[in-house]
Amino acid sequence: MDIADDWVGVPWVPERRGEKPVDSLKERVVLQETQIKELKKQLDIMQAAEKAVGPVDAPHDRPRKAKSLVPKPKPSDTVMHADDNTVFRREFDKQALPIKLGDPLKPMFELTQKPEDMKRRAGRHVVWVLPKGFNVTHLDIDYYLPIFLSGLVEIEEPYGSLAEQTCRDVIRIGGAEGRLFTAMDKCIAPIKAALRHKSPVVVQRGLCVLEQLMTCDMAPKQDDRLSLAEFFVSFLPLILPILSITRNLMGASSEADRMETAEKIVETLSLIVRESGREEARRQIKQQFPDVALPPAS
């Protein structure tokens, strides 16, 4: 059987009824080009008609959506609930964190062992839940501290208070052991979120964390090792612009808690200069806060 050379690569197409079979590749190409030209002509005609009379499904002909009876939330309604989905809240609700809420009626003396606390109640406090033989010093600080810091922006209690207390405990222990340096990269983002918050309570939590970071490793200052306050100077360009904006917003208000927050920012800046002892820290702060009186870098 003699096979023509032009069959290679040509798809098989059933012959149309009443049409003459097309055998050669050249004839098939010509036929397809003719069909394409006819389709283009029909498309041009349809487009010209649509431009003349407008689209069939014009916007004014479409059925209008029924107006919703549920009012849209105001921006002020969403600000306070924007932080409800923090990592801290999710992990705490799943009981995936080694903490729980302590009994607020518990005597303070059982926690502090101080005679003056005999008649005081502990109030809202955190209880560390760890396996037998383990304590807070065994925590993976690089993993847990950023999670605890993310809860600083929580408005609803007990999440905010628990997050603040867990940060305090971890920073105190991790700073004394020099274990916070590797965690700082992950901690800057949640600290910034707290410092830029609209609530003065949240901002003051962030400021307290900054102050704790500046003073958590006082012992290394006695030797030549780098302190965390000195190490933190490299992160100031990320923190200072936010503090400047927050101070202006809080200071422009006549509310006592907001004005107190603005003053607290100035106190924290002075502490950073004093504890870091770096002229570079003082210079950076002066650029953002030229009206603030800062102590000399020692």
Image: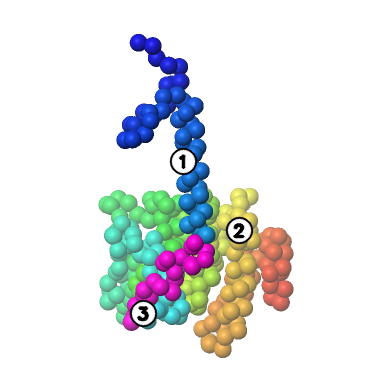
Which segment did they paint magenta? 49-70
User: Circle 1 sits in a helix, a strand or a loop, which is it?
Assistant: helix
Q: Name the residue under label 3.
A: 67
Tell me if residue 224 comes above or below residue 99 in the rendering. Answer: above
Which residue reaches farthest bottom? 254
Asked whether residue 82 is in view, the answer is yes
Instruction: Decide: few, some or many residues near mark 1? Use Cα within 10 Å; few <14, some 14-19, many ≥20.
Output: few
Q: Does the magenta stretch include residue 188?
A: no
**Residue that appears at 33% across and 31% down:** 14
Q: Mark 2 points at which residue?
A: 235
- x%, y% of residue 219? 55, 56
**Residue that appears at 34% across and 72% down:** 158
Q: How many labels does the image show?
A: 3
Amino acid under label 3?
A: Lys
Residue 35, disc: 1
Pointer 2 and pointer 1: residues touching (CB < 8 Å)? no
Of residue 296 and residue 141, the one placed in the foreground of this image is 141
Labels 2 and 1: the sequence-earlier one: 1
Amino acid under label 2?
A: Phe
Instruction: Decide: few, some or many residues near mark 2? Use Cα within 10 Å; few <14, some 14-19, many ≥20.
Output: few
Indicate which label's residue lies in the foreground, 3 or 2.
Answer: 3
Labels 1 and 3: the sequence-earlier one: 1
